[in-house]
Amino acid sequence: MPKAAQKIQQVGSTQKAAPDFLIENHGSVFLLRPLTEAARMWIDEHIGADNGFQPMYPTVLIEHGYISAIIRGLIEEGWACR
């Protein structure tokens, strides 16, 4: 198969990237769970274990008022969220 045809086939594929983060709504708080080592490192660098009450670290508890901005920022940086 010519390289151009291979490229078109790759672009047209419907494979989805595995998520880096899982976002869970638990009523009064959201949980941001890292699913990859790179995602855990992002949490270490951008949020940290000492940022408020984080008893489930590296899973991060996030209040409703902050979750949409965090998700938007993750997606803009190229992270896959589910």
Image (cartoon, rainbow, N blue to C red):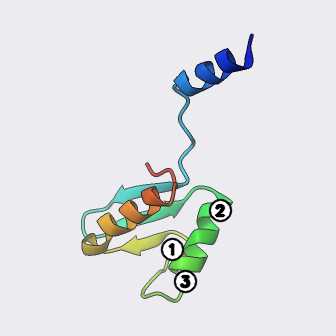
**Mark in front: 1 vs 2:** 2
What residue is shown at x 31% (from left), y 73% (from top)? 66
> Which callout, 3 or 2, points at the residue further toward the start of the chain?
2
Q: How many marks?
A: 3
Q: Residues within 10 Å of mark 2 (few under 14, many from 20)?
A: few
For badge 3, the amino acid type reads Ala
Q: Amino acid at mark 1?
A: Met
Q: Which residue is mark 2?
A: 38
* Left or right: 53, with 78 as reference point: left
Q: Which residue does the image show at 30% across and 64% down from the upper left?
A: 68
- Mark 3 crowdedness (10 Å alpha carbons): few <14, some 14-19, many ≥20: some
Residue 56 numbered mark, or none: 1
Q: Secondary structure at mark 2?
A: helix
Q: Is residue 44 above or below residue 32?
A: below
Q: Residues within 10 Å of mark 1 (few under 14, many from 20)?
A: few
> Which kind of residue does numbered mark 2 sit on?
Ala
Tell which residue pokes out farthest to the top in this image: 1
- Which circle, 3 or 2, is nearer the viewer? 2
Q: Position of residue 38 (x, y in %)?
A: 65, 62
Q: CA distance from mark 3 to mark 2?
A: 16 Å
Task: Measure the alpha-carbon separation of dots 1 and 3.
Answer: 9 Å
Q: Residue 26: horizontal and vertical position, in percent?
A: 31, 62
Check disc 3 and report the residue beneath it: 49
Q: Earlier in the sequence, mark 1 or mark 2?
A: 2
Answer above or below: position of 28 versus 76: below
The residue closer to the viewer here, 54 or 78, is: 78
Q: Secondary structure at mark 1?
A: loop
State which quarter of the image contains the N terminus. top right
Q: Marks 1/2: CA distance? A: 18 Å
Earlier residue among tags 1 and 3? 3
Residue 35, how many percent across, how many down? 58, 55
